[in-house]
Image (cartoon, rainbow, N blue to C red):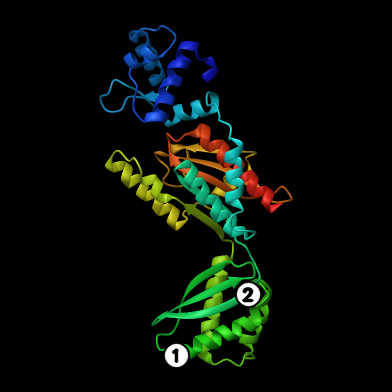
């Protein structure tokens, strides 16, 4: 549709959207008549704005005479008028250095990428990846309180994962020590998947020489770990607090709180990987376009990253307000995905 606009309509539309992206404020016809180089009267501009409103690209908030772009209008601008910026060599070097700051640990690279994207975009950095299945170096149960223990897993590449495990209320600390020693002898240098069949057989045939209580602790700990690993995706979100900046109304606060709750609960975010599989590059979801979660009033910019076989295995992205700086954030997300892919390769 943007190609069907005449020059006057296109320039009015462009200025309204660009002003919104910069200030978040509606623009009136009198202001536009002073900034446009087309020598158009305020009356003519009002007619153009009315036509754009009729097509669903603009709307008038409250009783203001100014106009703002709708989600459909933003989509049209992004697809047809947005001029992407170029990252400077300094910015490229910064992204690369940030991604490799924590060495070769894959999950640490992804966590650093999420933090970096959040800082550069002033939004929330999002990374979705497959769970790693590294070999284990150390396993330990640590008592927390009656009925609760912490299962600590340390992999050979230095990554630490924790699981909260329910244990019998009257359990002695020595039971946790026996459970830890047993798992360390079976899991060290192996993944859980590699060792689970052997452990399950030993426990079932009572060949492990463990008492009933210790056996239960081992079984419950492995069961919880296995359930979380199976079919699970690693979701990393950094900078959620940035989404709370510059809120202008109570309904905005409620909307962002719902979005943060979705992020914390990982609700529907595993479907982001499905969205990326069909994309050759960056995908942009604006406001109500995305029905997966509480994105109304927010936008999501995603780019897939690939392994050495050029298969999409994860996505990186940024969540921010619909008036985020697309021209800057899109190339930033795209380049970060390429850096992660090269590190994988």
Judged left or right of residue 159, residue 20 is left
Judged left or right of residue 330, residue 55 is left
Residue 107: x %, y % from top left? 59, 59
For the point 51% across and 46% down, which residue is it? 117
Instruction: Measure how far apart labels 2 and 1 are at the Cα level.
Output: 25 Å
The residue tagged 2 is: 137
Of labels 2 and 1, earlier in sequence is 2
Residue 281: x %, y % from top left? 62, 38
For the point 28% across and 39% down, which residue is it? 249
* SS under mark 1: loop
**Which residue occupies the foreground of this view, 15 or 166?**
15
Residue 345: x %, y % from top left? 72, 51
* SS under mark 2: strand
For the point 50% across and 14% down, which residue is it? 5
Which quadrant would residue 138 be assigned to in this image? bottom right
* Mark 2 vs mark 1: in front: 2
Q: Residues within 10 Å of mark 2 (few under 14, many from 20)?
A: some
């Amino acid at each position: 549709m943007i190609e069907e606009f005449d020059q006057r309509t296109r320039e009015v539309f462009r200025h309204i959207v660009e002003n919104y992206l910069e200030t978040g404020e509606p623009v009136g016809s009198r202001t536009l008549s002073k900034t446009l180089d087309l020598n158009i009267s305020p009356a003519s501009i009002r007619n153009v704005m009315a036509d754009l409103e009729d097509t669903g690209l603009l709307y008038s908030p409250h009783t203001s005479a100014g106009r703002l772009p709708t989600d459909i209008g933003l989509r049209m601008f992004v697809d047809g008028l947005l001029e992407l910026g170029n990252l400077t060599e300094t910015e490229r070097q910064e992204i690369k250095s940030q991604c490799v700051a924590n060495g070769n640990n894959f999950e640490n690279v992804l966590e650093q990428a999420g933090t970096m994207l959040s800082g550069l975009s002033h939004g929330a950095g999002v990374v979705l990846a497959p769970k790693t299945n590294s070999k284990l170096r150390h396993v330990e149960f640590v008592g927390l309180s009656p009925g609760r223990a912490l299962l600590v897993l340390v992999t050979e590449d230095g990554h630490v994962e924790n699981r909260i495990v329910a244990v019998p209320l009257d359990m002695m600390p020595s039971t946790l020590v026996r459970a830890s020693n047993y798992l360390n002898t079976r899991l060290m240098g192996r993944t859980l998947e590699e060792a689970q069949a052997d452990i399950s057989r030993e426990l079932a045939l009572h060949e492990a020489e463990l008492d009933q209580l210790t056996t239960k602790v081992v079984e419950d700990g492995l069961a919880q770990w296995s359930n979380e690993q199976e079919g699970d995706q690693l979701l990393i979100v950094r900078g959620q607090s940035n989404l709370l900046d510059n809120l202008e109304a109570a309904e905005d606060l409620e909307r962002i709180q719902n979005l943060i709750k979705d992020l914390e609960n990982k609700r529907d975010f595993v479907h982001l990987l499905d969205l990326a599989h069909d994309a050759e590059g960056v995908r942009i979801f604006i406001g109500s376009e995305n029905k997966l979660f509480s994105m109304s009033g927010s936008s999501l910019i995603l780019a897939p990253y690939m392994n050495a076989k050029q298969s999409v295995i994860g996505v990186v992205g940024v969540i921010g307000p619909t008036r985020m700086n697309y021209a800057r954030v899109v190339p930033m997300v795209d380049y970060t995905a390429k850096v992660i892919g090269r590190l994988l390769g």
